Image (spheres, rainbow, N blue to C red):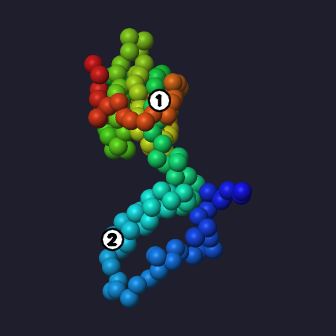
Amino acid sequence: MKLPDLRVCPCLEKGGAPRWAAESSRPRIRRSVQLAGVGLLITLLSALGCCAQAPGLSMAEGNTLVSVDYEIFGKVQGVFFRKYTQAEGKKLGLVGWVQNTDRGTVQGQLQGPVSKVRFMQEWLETRGSPKSHIDRANFNNEKVIANLDYSDFQIVK
């Protein structure tokens, strides 16, 4: 028995659409409702074993939750690094924590969708707060998680 290729839903090959999703004679609906419908269609197709992919991001990767610990080295204390980290994490919809260490570094944990965690890792490694100077960033203990352990992004004192 040959298994179907799950990378492309057979019903969507060559720009086609599922028979039940054909255009109806109803008046045009607003764009936001159409976009919401596209999201529901992707969810439905995923549940049926099909997979609709956004360019460069697989469905599995986009929905995967990860947790990663970090430690940032350089001039990162006394420059509002924790406050900016918290604000950036919240802006991205991530959860976790950040704190100063006795070694003059900043450490913490990030949790959320893998694509947003990757963006935050890049931010921690290259940007930080305006007056900070980052020498290096260490990320470790990365793992896939089923549920978030935190409800928001906290500064730990």
Residue at the far front in the pictured view: 1
Quadrant placement of the N terminus: bottom right
Q: Is residue 55 above or below residue 105?
A: below
Which residue is found at the position 40% from the left and 24% from the top?
108
The disc at residue 68 is 1
Q: Residue at x 43, y 36 (%)?
A: 146
Query: Which of pointers 2 and 1 indicates the residue nearer the eye?
Result: 2
**Which residue is depicted at the point 34% across and 27% down?**
97
Sequence-wise first label, 2 or 1? 2
Left or right: 18 with respect to 87?
A: right
Q: Residue furthest top?
A: 102
Name the residue at 51% across, 24% down: 141
x, y (%) of residue 86? 32, 34
Q: Quadrant of the C terminus?
A: top left
Identify the residue under disc 2. Answer: 33
Q: Position of residue 128 (x, y in %)?
A: 42, 34
Q: Amino acid at mark 1?
A: Val
Q: Is residue 37 visible?
A: yes
Residue 75: image location, x then y, percent: 43, 23
- Label 2 Cα neighbours within 10 Å, binned few <14 / some 14-19 / many ≥20: few
Q: Secondary structure at mark 2?
A: helix
Which class describes the residues within 10 Å of circle 1: few (<14), some (14-19), or many (20+)? many
Quarter-wise, where is residue 5 in the image? bottom right
Q: CA distance from mark 2 to mark 1?
A: 36 Å
In the rendered image of this protein, does residue 10 appear above or below residue 69? below
